[in-house]
Amino acid sequence: MLGSMQDWPLVVPKILDHAACYHGEREMVTRSVEGPIVRTTYADLHSRSRRVAKALTRRGIRLGDRIATLAWNTARHFETWYGIMGIGAVCHTVNPRLFAEQIAYIINHAEDRLVFVDTTFIPTLEKIAKQIDRVEGYVILTDAANMPKTTLPNAVAFEDWLKDVDDDFEWAKFDENTAAGLCYTSGTTGNPKGVLYSHRSNVLHGLAVNTGDCVGAKSTDVFLPVVPMFHANAWATVFACPMVGAKMVMPGAKLDGPSVYELLEMEQVTITAAVPTVWQMLLAHMEANNLKLSTLRKVMIGGSACPPSMIETFEKKYGVEVMHAWGMTEMSPVGTIGSFKFGMEKLPWPEQLKVKSKQGRAMFTVEMKIVDDDGKDLPHDGKAFGHLMVRGPAIARAYFKGEGGRHGTDSIVDKDGWFDTGDIATLDELGFMQITDRAKDVIKSGGEWISSIDIENFAVGCPGVAQAAVIGVHHPKWDERPLLIIVRKPSADVTKEQVLKFLEGKIAKWWTPDDVAFVNEIPLTATGKIQKVALRTQFKDYKLPAAS
Ligand code: AMP
């Protein structure tokens, strides 16, 4: 017997309808790419998104067509998203930090018909314009007064493109499983692969992220997503905030410490989200200038492991709750978040810090398990570590165009629907998960695994250390041993002996790195993660002292 409730499709435009109807006066504040702060409201955004939708329809864009954006977090980018999704076209967010060659590859692979682009990224596109000649036109996210000269064919300023179009437009009608967004991930080997979100998965994910134990934003909150919209939907905040009418503060092109600090204070931000490298810049700026945070209550940190020292600084020095989160593009992207269970807030601080340093618990809509190399379930005891598998309605079942499928199919999940995250993790009795490594980064010493993330987390807590990375280096007896690579803080002169001494007692003795190398820079990926592949290449002939 079927239930007899209404068929109300879970589609993205309904989110903005709700925001405009019940929170129409609530602001979105943007640091525009042109410079000035620009204020709009959900009512304005609703109206302008429908104008985008109408303009796209007039120009022949149809259900299922792919439209690319190369843009910062701004109101115009937001309107473009909702306009594209509102007609059932697919919003392909391109990460502008990728190499030009990769950008050309994914724009061609996605068969994007139009590209909406911030002025910042015009030079990148001009270089590859000939390679992406199937793109029919470029909409530059600015107005006529700020429109630069460009060699991009059929380029028009966004405000001109919208000029003759009013907002008398009804969102298109389509099934909730219709594709809404496309985001390429280069986490796996080979070419980047496209993750194709649906309207249903976006709405469900926005709802899940909004639960109280997760981000739990409210209408009274002011949310600053520093995490870019091109990094897996700005972690769903672009859906979660309008859903509840939270004010949004969009940082535009300026993600440095002083600029982020200025917005946090000026707009009285209560919740914010970004990768650890962003917070490193903010904390350094605050420390150097003896600044405080007056309204911020929660900071969501994920994308790579958040070092305990960063958690401690936010919580103890600035009184801001840290929500350590883990996820991946394939998961929409949030999988776990580290909010406390009943009674944990009464634990002594060192115990609390241990819990907060883990990547957190699965939120509803995410199932998790860990398995060994043979696929056998491992215990949830906080000790056994294995391949982390996930399942849920906002988790990819296949990549765009069926790439990377198993056994001649397009499916990237096993017969029971589990997706292998490529991460190695532990799960404890209370459901808290801790990532120990990417499967391909794990260090195998004498057949036993060493967690590079654990060592890195402690090493960045050592005075004088700005960044730390650990890779496995060939060793004649143990196969591999850990090498610790460090970037010193400006004017610090921390030595190998000091770092190794600092690690003593914090990690198992046999995990102690065999050597420490100091470098000026650690290469990062387009989403701010340590590029271990590049480091391994750089140090491939490295001779460990014990091995020589
Ligand atoms: P991406 O799809 O680019 O967001 O990358 C996803 C990967 O980033 C995950 O599979 C993890 O390896 C890593 N990652 C994300 N969040 C965390 C975290 N909090 N701690 C450790 N690794 C993380």
Image (cartoon, helix red, strand yellow):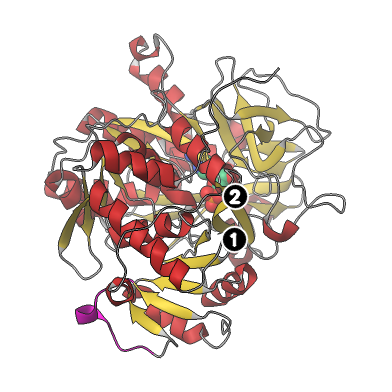
- Residue nearest the observer in this picture, 528 or 226: 226
The numbered disc on residue 467 is none
Q: Is mark 2 within 8 Å of ligand 1?
A: no
Magenta-highlighted residues: 141-150
| Left or right of residue 298, residue 70 in this image | right
Q: Is residue 358 visible?
A: yes
Residue assigned mark 2: 178
Any atom of ligand 1 within 8 Å of the CB at mark 1?
no
Disc 1 crowd rating (10 Å Cα; few below 14, some 14-19, many 20+) is some
**Residue 137: image location, x then y, percent:** 46, 80
- Which residue does the image show at 23% across and 36% down from the upper left? 270
Viewport quadrant of the N terminus: top right
Does 148 lie within the magenta span?
Answer: yes
Identity, as a three-letter code, of the amino acid under mark 1: Gly
Report how far apart the C-alphas of labels 1 and 2 lie in the structure. Answer: 8 Å
Q: Residue at x 16, y 35 (%)?
A: 295
Which residue matches tag 1?
64
**Within the image, what quadrant is residue 133 found in?**
bottom right
Q: Secondary structure at mark 1?
A: loop
**Front one among 302 and 270:** 270
Residue type for callout 2: Thr
Residue located 65% across and 42% down the image: 421
Q: Secondary structure at mark 2?
A: loop
Q: Is residue 513 visible?
A: no
- Does the CB distance between marks 1 and 2 fall below 8 Å? yes
> Ligand 1: which quarter?
top right
Which residue lies most toward the right here?
407
